[in-house]
């Protein structure tokens, strides 16, 4: 008689965070990547690392992190399609890695919900395959706060401290000013919270900021004469940093346009902004409930960091763009996922819980479908704008403008990039030359000046 035994293996858990990352990648590849040309700011960042095109003027507020990220791709190919695919895959992998840091703090279900809440926003989808810094700051910030919470929870391993320092460095490298606003509340937390008054986390944050900001600070001395001078130039480029309430502009531009400057357009589809208007109340409720449950750190710290990162975009500038608040949305997603889980657990009756789950799923599906509607419209607008840049560059080449050459005017960077020319501007926030210098250069190489039909060519172009 032969006895047989059956080994019972526990069922494998569904890797929900990984599935969210995969869905994020597929959605970008299907709905965004095939339809997106290069935007104005993208050409500035890409030109810094593109070996085949002259570098555009790099203004004081910018940081070079996104140029460094795209440099390996540009060294191999100048194909926009390849660049888009690579960035879409990289951003999806970064989304998974950033929220994976939170899994020991929240569990896989809440972590996946937090990632989905952020990944489902139209801005997150639109900027995933773009060479723009805001999304990468957002993912670095959410990973930073996750590593900080893990590094301050004894016993903190070296891995958590290294992750914390690396993510602070990444956020600062992608956008120096955002790195400052992310670092300040973390260092303040190390000083205020008794349980976190240990040198290791504070040293990791400070070291990460120093490493990430080293290039920006060095360039400040080389090009502007110091950090103070660069900050003054940054303020001038931004239109004058000061006390400005930009919350209304951020709300009006929530569904587009991609840049609201000047921001006089009326709000499009206000019913689709209810989720945004509810964010402060939901964050406050999440903080109160977490404090009562004695799990305040996991909720309070990301909310505080989100509030700090929102300050320059809601209080200090007089224009707006939907991408500016991406780091805020990323940091608020874990507290909102925690709030949703708390609400689910508060319902005792199985029937009521099933009904609530169905209602929540329906609301989430409605929200995601609305985000897709806004994504589709803004992708079309971005595609149309990029097509106008390409058409202008094609017309200039047809008129005989070939490299080495120079294009001047408000939209010179994207048009010059497509034409393979350098770009310059004699006025506006990105002024980097004078009319006299432009005329001297025109004596050595072909120069084209862009002007509106109604205003006609500038005076120096007629001399």
Image (spheres, grey):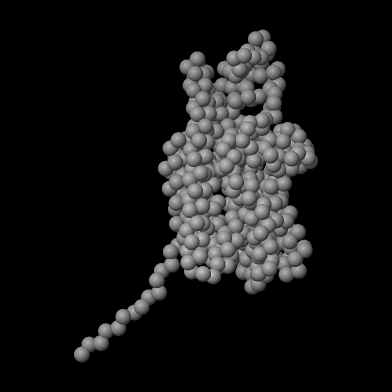
Q: Give the quarter of the image for residue 168.
A: bottom right
Q: Residue at x 62, y 59 (%)?
A: 335
Residue sitting nearer the eye, 287 or 303: 287
Q: Residue at x 68, y 57 (%)?
A: 284
The N terminus: image quadrant:
bottom left
Residue sticking out furthest to the bottom:
1
Visible residue check, residue 254: yes
Is 45 on the left or on the right of 365, as rendered? right
Q: How far from the left and from the top, in percent, is residue 268?
A: 58, 35
| Camera-side residue of 136 and 424 | 136
Return the residue found at the far top: 463
Residue 422's quadrant in the figure?
A: top right
Q: Is residue 262 found left or right of 93 in the rendered image?
A: right
Residue 225 horizontal/vertical position (percent): 77, 37
Looking at the picture, how far across and down is residue 28, in whole percent?
46, 44
Name the residue at 64% across, 47% down. Answer: 277
Coordinates of residue 252 in the picture (x, y in percent)? 63, 37
Which image quadrant: the C terminus? top right
Tell me: residue 381, above or below residue 362: above
- Is 25 or 275 nearer to us in this picture? 275
């Amino acid at each position: 008689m032969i006895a047989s035994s059956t080994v019972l293996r526990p069922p494998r858990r569904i890797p929900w965070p990984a599935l969210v990352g995969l869905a994020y990648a597929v959605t970008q590849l299907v709905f965004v990547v095939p339809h997106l040309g290069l935007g104005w700011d993208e050409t500035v960042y890409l030109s810094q690392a593109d070996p085949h095109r002259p570098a555009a003027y790099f203004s004081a507020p910018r940081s070079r992190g996104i140029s460094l990220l795209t440099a390996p791709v540009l060294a191999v190919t100048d194909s926009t399609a390849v660049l888009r695919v690579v960035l879409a895959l990289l951003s999806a992998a970064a989304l998974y890695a950033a929220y994976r840091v939170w899994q020991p703090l929240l569990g896989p279900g809440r972590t996946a919900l937090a990632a989905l809440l952020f990944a489902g926003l139209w801005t997150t989808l639109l900027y995933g395959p773009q060479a723009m810094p805001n999304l990468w700051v957002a993912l670095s910030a959410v990973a930073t706060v996750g590593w900080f919470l893990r590094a301050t929870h004894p016993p903190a391993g070296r891995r958590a401290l290294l992750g914390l320092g690396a993510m602070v460095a990444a956020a600062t490298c992608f956008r120096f000013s955002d790195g400052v606003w992310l670092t300040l509340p973390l260092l303040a937390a190390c000083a205020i919270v008794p349980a976190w008054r240990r040198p290791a986390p504070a040293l990791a944050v400070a070291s990460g900021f120093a490493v990430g900001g080293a290039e920006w600070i060095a360039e400040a001395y080389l090009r502007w004469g110091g950090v103070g001078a660069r900050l003054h130039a940054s303020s001038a480029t931004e239109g004058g940093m000061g006390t400005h309430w930009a919350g209304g502009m951020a709300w009006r531009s929530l569904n587009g346009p991609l840049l609201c400057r000047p921001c006089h357009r009326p709000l499009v589809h206000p019913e689709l902004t209810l989720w945004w208007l509810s964010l402060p109340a939901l964050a406050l409720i999440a903080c109160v409930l977490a404090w009562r449950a004695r799990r305040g750190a996991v909720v309070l710290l990301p909310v505080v960091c989100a509030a700090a990162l929102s300050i320059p975009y809601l209080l200090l500038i007089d224009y707006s763009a939907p991408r500016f608040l991406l780091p805020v949305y990323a940091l608020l997603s874990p507290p909102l996922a925690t709030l949703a889980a708390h609400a689910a657990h508060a319902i005792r009756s199985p029937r009521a819980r099933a009904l609530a789950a169905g209602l929540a799923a329906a609301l989430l599906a409605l929200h995601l479908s609305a985000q897709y509607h806004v994504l589709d419209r803004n992708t079309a607008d971005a595609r149309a704008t990029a097509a106008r840049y390409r058409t202008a560059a094609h017309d200039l080449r047809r008129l005989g403008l070939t490299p080495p050459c120079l294009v001047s005017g408000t939209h010179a960077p994207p048009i010059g990039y497509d034409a393979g020319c350098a770009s310059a501007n004699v006025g506006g926030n990105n002024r980097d030359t004078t009319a006299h210098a432009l005329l001297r250069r025109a004596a050595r190489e072909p120069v084209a000046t862009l002007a509106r039909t109604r205003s006609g060519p500038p005076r120096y172009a007629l001399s």
